[in-house]
């Protein structure tokens, strides 16, 4: 039984750039860097994992001018003879059609995380082996997916879904799986249990990623393959090479001694794009954002997740940063509504300088799929609703948009605005009430004010209730009284009136209020509600019955 | 709204259970009238009607006059209501209504224009009409005078007929109820007459 799978993406730096610019897949591509201070850079067959690529500096600390060198090349470029370590002119001499791109750390980091997350969709236990290398614990996956080749094909498919072409090896050990993936040409290679030694025997020694001095020693001995290394006597190796020689021998036999270090995904998933020149137009920035969001949504879709919050960080030409948090009202994984929300937010809060780098982070969550009831009335689709709410918020302001919710207070016109999120229960409130007997308890306090209204008024009364058009804030008016009853309102004659209706509240607090309400008919026919503030004695026009 | 219209053909103009006009899906309905004539009461009744069916409504409130407390007492499920306050800006209100009628899924989009109704060109009125048809939303416009002209399928004027006061003595202490009636200004088909209604305060 295979226990580990290894997902390997060759020439990972080039693959990461191809993922961001898919059109480059058909070209001969070389990734250039001003300097390479790691001796492992560009070694054949090994992932270019943790190379340090800081620009070199002279003794005074100032960076020196460097010739651009090939850091990585894709398969097409390698067919033309381009190899890592070449200078750019040398590479162009060998391949005149060579397309070059600078090495961008964001591309590699994003592609590395994307590959890890894609593997995580297959198995809950994975290990980060470096850029372009993921180990997958496949124990128990046979019952879910099938035999080892099926698991391998699933891993290849997951990698392809995020724009990376991977090879997968499956074996009892991680070393065996990695060597199988690195040395074979087929997308999926399986080494059956008990055949590790035979399966690894023909692989070149370079796949073990040994220390340079040890590799040189073994090369002097004429050891070229893992089989030749495995055939050496263990005691002799221990005597001549010490612990490093024993470890190399174990690796050649396909034995793992390092513990498995499970990888857990970060709370936010990020995709970034470096720009060669500054962008000062929102329209152009939207195109870049769309590209970045497409990659982000590919990653989310590959593992069946959605995002419920986005964070945009724009690097500015001035050296500063412009960061915006956009919370999504509904978890989503589609590019279009996300892009619309980001653009609307950036329209309202534009960056202060041209943009040179774009990074978008998404907070992934697992969404619960649900089906509406057969009799459930149609409601706005979350994708449409989020979009229209964002546009309305940009038009009228976020504070002026939402669902009103009554506050538990006797103070007139006491309410707050909540984000609009209509309930999703299949039965409307009236239907729920219809089936409830009178002896049953009233709805819970959280069941909204409409349910409270049901307990106060019989349905017939509620059906035809006179509405009041509130005047906010209540308009102060001059009222002439006859006795205590209003007779004139701002020189308009009061034809009829009723009142007072006395109300007060919160007398124990600094926000105390007390008022007398009068319903009056004015000479022009308007039926109004007048209020006299008993604390100040002022009269206000509270609203108009209509 | 569908049930009400289904029994009366494609252009249903009344709710047989409540005996009052109900806006039509996919069409523009206008309710106009003077102050205290019952326009807003009709609007709240329509919101209640939509919410009672488990559907979603939006209210574009130009002058921010909507009273959630009274609406809740009238039976409106406020959770199903999207309230857009426009701060007195009529052009903003029109643009907000235009956005909302293009979002499928709302059963009712109500536009309360208040006392000062802006001019709307025929082109814009037709644009609203076709947007409403495409998304099958009922657009209800409340105002002092009509806005969309011939684009409205139904236009009604509300009139106040009487007021009843309540109180123990000779001097009333409370407004009891208001009686209003409706007059059809425009209807694409023959509209039924609605009896006068009493609105309880």
Image (tube, coloured by chain):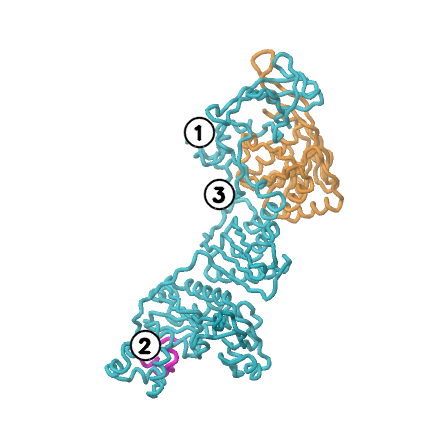
Chain colours: A cyan, B orange
Q: Position of residue A219 (x, y in %)?
A: 36, 86
Q: Position of residue A336 (x, y in %)?
A: 58, 56
Q: Magenta span covers which residues? A: A189-208
Asked if marks 1 and 2 fall on the same chain, the answer is yes
Q: Nearer the viewer, residue A522 or B37?
A: A522
Instruction: Specify the farthest residue to the right.
Output: B122
Q: Nearer the viewer, residue A341 or B138?
A: A341
Task: Indicate the quadrant where residue A173 lies.
Answer: bottom left
Q: Earlier in the sequence, mark 3 or mark 1?
A: 3
Q: Chain of mark 2?
A: A
Q: Is residue A545 above or below residue B54?
A: above
Q: Is residue A327 above or below residue A152?
A: above
Task: Indicate the quadrant where residue A222 lies.
Answer: bottom left
Residue that mark 1 sits on: A438
Quadrant in the picture for the C terminus of chain A: top right
Callout 2: few (<14), some (14-19), or many (20+) C-alpha neighbours within 10 Å? many
Residue that mark 2 sits on: A251
Q: Is residue B19 left or right of residue A422?
A: right
Q: Is residue A230 left or right of residue A36?
A: left
Q: Earlier in the sequence, mark 1 or mark 2?
A: 2
Q: Is residue A81 left or right of residue A493?
A: left
Asked if marks 3 and 1 fall on the same chain, the answer is yes
Q: Earlier in the sequence, mark 2 or mark 3?
A: 2
Q: CA distance from mark 1 to mark 2?
A: 77 Å
| Secondary structure category for the residue under label 2 | helix
Q: Is A238 included in the stretch rendered in magenta?
A: no
Q: CA distance from mark 3 to mark 1?
A: 22 Å
Q: Which mark is residue A425?
A: 3
The answer to whether residue A334 is visible is: no
Q: Residue at x 50, y 48 (%)?
A: A372
């Amino acid at each position: 039984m295979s226990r580990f799978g290894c997902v390997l993406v060759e020439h990972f730096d080039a693959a990461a750039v191809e993922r961001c610019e898919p059109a480059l897949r058909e070209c001969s591509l070389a990734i250039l860097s001003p300097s390479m201070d790691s001796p492992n850079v560009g070694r054949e067959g090994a992932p270019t994992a943790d190379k340090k690529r800081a620009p070199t500096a002279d003794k005074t600390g100032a960076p020196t001018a460097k010739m651009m060198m090939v850091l990585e090349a894709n398969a097409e470029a390698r067919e033309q003879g381009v190899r890592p370590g070449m200078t750019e002119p040398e590479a162009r001499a060998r391949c005149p059609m060579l397309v070059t791109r600078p090495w961008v750390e964001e591309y590699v980091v994003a592609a590395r995380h994307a590959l890890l997350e894609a593997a995580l969709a297959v198995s809950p236990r994975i290990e980060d082996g470096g850029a372009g290398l993921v180990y997958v614990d496949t124990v128990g996956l046979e019952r879910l997916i099938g035999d080892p080749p099926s698991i391998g094909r699933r891993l290849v498919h997951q990698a392809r879904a995020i724009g990376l072409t991977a090879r997968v090896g499956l074996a009892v050990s991680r070393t065996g799986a990695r060597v199988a993936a690195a040395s074979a040409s087929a997308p999926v290679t399986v080494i059956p249990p008990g055949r590790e030694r035979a399966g690894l025997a023909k692989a070149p020694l370079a796949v073990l990623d040994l220390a340079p001095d040890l590799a040189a020693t073994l090369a002097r001995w004429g050891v070229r393959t893992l089989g030749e290394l495995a055939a050496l006597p263990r005691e002799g190796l221990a005597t001549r090479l010490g612990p490093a020689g024993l470890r190399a021998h174990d690796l050649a036999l396909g034995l793992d001694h390092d513990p498995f270090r499970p990888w857990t995904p970060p709370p936010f998933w990020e995709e970034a794009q470096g720009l060669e020149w500054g962008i000062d137009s929102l329209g152009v920035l939207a195109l870049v954002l769309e590209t970045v969001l497409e990659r982000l949504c590919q990653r989310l879709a590959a593992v069946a997740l959605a995002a419920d919050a986005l964070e945009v960080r724009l690097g500015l030409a001035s050296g500063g940063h412009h960061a915006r948090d956009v919370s999504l009202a509904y978890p989503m994984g589609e590019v279009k509504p996300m892009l619309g929300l980001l653009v609307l937010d950036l329209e309202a809060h534009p960056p202060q300088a041209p943009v040179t780098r774009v990074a978008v982070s998404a907070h992934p969550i697992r969404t619960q799929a649900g089906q509406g009831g057969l009799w459930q009335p149609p409601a706005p689709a979350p994708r449409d609703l989020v979009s229209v709410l964002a546009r309305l918020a940009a038009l009228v302001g976020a504070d002026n948009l939402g669902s009103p919710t009554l506050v538990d207070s006797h103070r007139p016109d006491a309410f707050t605005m909540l984000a609009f999120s209509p309930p999703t229960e299949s039965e409307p409130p009236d239907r729920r009430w219809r089936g409830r007997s009178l002896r049953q308890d009233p709805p819970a306090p959280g069941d909204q004010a409409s349910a409270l209204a049901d307990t106060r008024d019989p349905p017939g009364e509620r059906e035809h209730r006179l509405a009041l058009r509130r005047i906010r804030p209540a308009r102060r008016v001059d009222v002439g009284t006859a006795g205590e009853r209003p007779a004139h309102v701002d020189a308009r004659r009061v034809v009829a009136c009723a009142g007072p209706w006395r109300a007060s509240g919160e007398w124990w607090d600094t926000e105390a209020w007390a008022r007398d309400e009068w319903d009056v008919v004015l000479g022009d026919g308007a039926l109004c509600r007048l209020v006299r503030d008993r604390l100040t004695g002022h009269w206000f026009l509270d609203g108009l019955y209509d | 709204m569908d049930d009400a219209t289904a029994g009366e053909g494609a252009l249903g103009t009344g709710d047989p259970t409540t005996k009052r006009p109900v806006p039509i899906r996919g069409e523009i309905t206008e309710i106009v009238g003077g102050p205290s004539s019952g326009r807003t009461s009709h609007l709240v009744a329509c919101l209640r009607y939509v919410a009672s069916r488990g559907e979603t409504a939006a209210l574009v409130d130009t002058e921010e006059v909507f009273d959630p407390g009274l609406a809740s007492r009238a039976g409106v499920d406020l959770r199903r209501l999207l309230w857009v306050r426009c701060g007195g800006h009529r052009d903003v209100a029109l643009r907000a209504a235009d956005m909302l009628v293009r979002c499928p899924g709302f059963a009712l989009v109500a536009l309360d224009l208040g006392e000062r109704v802006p001019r709307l060109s025929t082109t814009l009125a037709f644009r609203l009409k076709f947007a409403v048809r495409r998304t099958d939303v009922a657009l209800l416009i409340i105002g002092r005078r009509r806005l969309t002209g011939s684009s409205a399928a139904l236009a009604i004027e509300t009139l106040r007929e009487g007021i009843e006061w309540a109180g123990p003595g000779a001097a009333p202490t409370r407004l009891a109820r208001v009686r209003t009636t409706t007059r059809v200004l425009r209807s694409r088909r023959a509209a039924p007459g609605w009896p006068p209604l009493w609105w309880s305060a």
